[in-house]
Image (tube, helix red, strand yellow):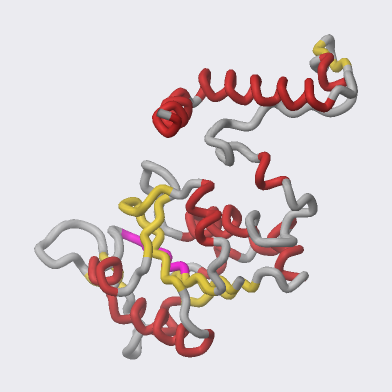
Amino acid sequence: MRVDVLTLFPGIFSGPLDHSILLKAREAGLLTIAVHDLREFAEGKHRVTDEPPLGGGGGMVMKPEPIFAGVEALRERFGPGKAVLLSPQGETLTSSLARRLAPEEHLILICGRYEGVDQRVADHLADLEVSIGDYVLTGGELPALVLIDAVARFLPGVLGDPMASTRDSFEEGLLEAPQYTRPRLFRGHAVPEVLLSGDHAAVEEWRREEALRRTRERRPDLVTRISHKGS
């Protein structure tokens, strides 16, 4: 997969992309990520990328011209790509959405800033708007990193254990069961005996029950969704 990112602050991406799983995926050729300064696609001596909102109001709005030019240039150079606008108004990022995006060969992520992006970008350029939650951040850079990480986990070969992503929270609509490792006893707190039994069927049953218990306690809305699907 190739991911191109359009942003006013390219430096934000240098740390997270250069460590751990994402770095290994890039080194292995499983994931190509390029970060582009949006100002490169702005016209004029001062490379202006934002203007005051029409109709009045505070703050600045990102202009459509540089964004359209950037996406079109990337598509011309690297082929068709799904343009994703990171926006509080977008579809909430879920495990299902990340899995849906994983087969795409090319993603172009558009990072908004300030008071937002000219609506014509969402209406006539972006193929999808994505939000990472019901809150507002200072820009789309952190959501873009979250999206990249979430999608990368579903790319073949990225995770050492190919089945790991199927056991994560939300994959079956539930939160993941608790995990333990050695020592068996730590500061008076013991590991559940079933995990030491060697009975794989019993372990799987325990994990399923714990996942359901944890989900009922922490995310009852997920249990409700599962019940509605089954009805």
- 137 sits left or right of 104 in the view: left
- Residue situated in front as seen by the camera: 208 or 87: 208
Residue at 42% across, 34% down = 229
Residue 167 x %, y %: 67, 40
Query: Is residue 58 shown above or below 63?
Result: above
- Residue at image position (46%, 49%) is 93
**Residue 115: where, in percent of width, then height?**
28, 58
58 left or right, relative to 8: left
Q: In the figure, residue 13 lies in which quadrant?
A: bottom right
Q: Residue furthest left?
A: 55
Residue 168 lies, with reference to residue 66, above or below; the image says: above
Please state the horizontal and vertical placement of residue 34, each as a whole percent of the image: 58, 75
Question: 87 or 48, which is in the foreground?
Answer: 87
Residue 70 in the image, given as x and y percentages of width and height: 41, 81
Total number of numbered discs in the rendering: 0
For residue 51, side relative to residue 85 (left or right): left
Residue 78 part of the magenta-drawn span: no
Residue at 37% from the left image edge and 43% from the top image edge: 135
Q: Residue furthest top?
A: 188
Q: Is residue 193 above or below residue 70?
A: above
For the magenta stretch, what is the residue range?
A: 109-114
Q: Is residue 113 magenta?
A: yes
Residue 145's place in the image compared with 54, above or below, is above
Residue at image position (58%, 57%) is 151
- Foreground of the two, 217 or 15: 217
* 33 relative to 109 in the view: left or right: right
The N terminus appears in which quarter of the rendering? bottom right
In the rendered image, the quadrant that contains the C terminus is top left
